[in-house]
Image: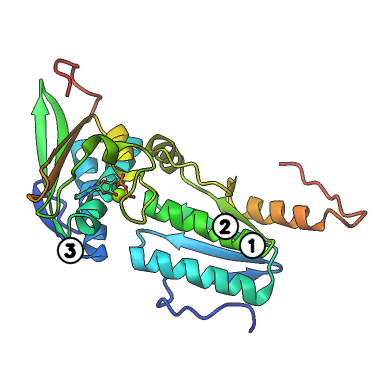
């Protein structure tokens, strides 16, 4: 298996591999079925390729309800079993505010402002045991 | 949906694809009435929770969407109804974390927090209607408590 994973869910949610990280970009309004399929695909892809992290880019998502929230938490939980970490990137402010009021806390999910930042976050975290790679970029 | 003209609508809720139409309609109707982005997002999220309950717990039903106005303030009213089993214990159903199925149990209580007015009419055996209303510039004035 190489770079991009085939999308049995009709190509609606591409799962890309960047180095040791899976990048999932969600767009628009997901059907429940698509979201559930995504959950399965991401955990399979993470297991197959021994990734260090999963980045879920939510910048194109206009709403997260408790269904999608649970899908995201489940992805994080499954990914953690594989010793990898999930970072949710680019959540829109209106979505974040609404999630808080809805009462969802999304346990196990780290957040980042953008998928670039998320990739950096995972890169640094996974490289830490080795000396001499503490390259810091100023924000 | 391209029907930029319509706020009033009655949409069926019988599949998860219908949930997508419900969300799109509520978004478009709220935008048209002048709700800001955060307020739109809250309404759409509440609608998504309630429509999913109609589908999953109520066995399907519909959403009626209508513009309302009080004291010159425009608002949006959404009624989600089904002819399912009804909710035997409302207090329990509204409690955060309670689910009779496999959900997170945050939908009903969460939706109540996301709107200005919230009412449930449900009797065991004769279905459930949840009606929510939000106003473009906050609740007009707290005259009567539910
Ligand atoms: N339309 C409905 N018909 C019957 N029961 C409902 C309906 N809506 C909600 N309920 C009941 O209220 C509970 C809580 O709803 P909710 O907070 O949305 O949690 P969830 O949907 O995750 O179970 C449901 O588990 C169900 O028992
Ligand atoms: Mg629910």
Near-viewer residue (B59 or B66): B59
Mark 2 Cα shell of 10 Å, populated few (<14), some (14-19), many (≥20): some
* Between A79 and B12, the one nearer to me in the picture: A79
Mark 2, mark 3: which one is toward the viewer? 2
Above or below, B112 against A9 in this view is above
Label 3 sits on residue? B14
Residue at image location 22% in from the left, 39% down from the top = B89
Read off the chain for label 2.
A
- The vertical placement of B59 against A18, above or below, is above
Q: Residue at x 56, y 69 (%)?
A: A43
Label 2 secondary element:
helix
Q: Kindly state the secondary structure of the residue where label 3 is placed.
A: loop
Q: Residue furthest bottom?
A: A1
Secondary element under disc 1, as helix, strand or loop, is: helix
Q: Are marks 2 and 3 in contact (CB under 8 Å)?
A: no
| Residue closest to the eye, B5 or A100 | A100
Return the mark for residue A77: 2
Residue A93 percent coordinates (x, y) = 46, 39
């Amino acid at each position: 298996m190489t770079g991009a994973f085939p999308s049995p869910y009709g190509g609606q949610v591409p799962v890309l591999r960047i180095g040791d990280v899976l990048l999932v970009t969600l767009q628009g309004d997901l059907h429940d079925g698509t979201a559930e399929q995504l959950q399965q695909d991401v955990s399979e892809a993470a297991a197959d390729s021994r990734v260090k992290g999963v980045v879920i880019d939510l910048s194109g998502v206009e709403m997260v309800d408790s269904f999608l929230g649970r899908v995201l938490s489940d992805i994080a939980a499954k990914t953690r079993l594989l010793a990898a970490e999930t970072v949710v990137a680019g959540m829109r402010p209106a979505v974040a505010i609404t999630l808080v009021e809805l009462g969802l806390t999304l346990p196990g999910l780290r957040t980042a402002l953008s998928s670039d930042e998320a990739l950096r976050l995972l890169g640094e975290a996974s490289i830490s045991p080795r000396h001499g790679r503490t390259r810091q970029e100023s924000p | 949906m391209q029907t930029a003209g319509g706020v009033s609508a009655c949409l069926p809720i019988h599949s998860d694809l219908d949930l997508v139409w419900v969300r799109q309609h509520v978004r478009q109707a709220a935008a048209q009435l002048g709700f800001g982005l955060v307020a739109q997002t809250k309404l759409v999220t509440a609608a998504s929770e309630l429509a999913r309950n109609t589908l999953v717990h109520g066995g399907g039903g519909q959403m009626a969407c209508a513009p309302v106005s009080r004291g010159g303030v425009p608002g949006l009213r959404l009624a989600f109804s089904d002819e399912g089993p009804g909710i035997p214990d409302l207090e329990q159903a509204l409690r955060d974390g309670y689910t009779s199925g496999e959900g997170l149990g945050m939908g009903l209580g969460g939706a109540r927090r996301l709107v200005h007015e919230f009412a449930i009419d449900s009797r065991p055996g004769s279905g459930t209607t949840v009606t929510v209303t939000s106003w473009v510039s906050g609740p007009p004035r707290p005259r009567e408590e539910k």
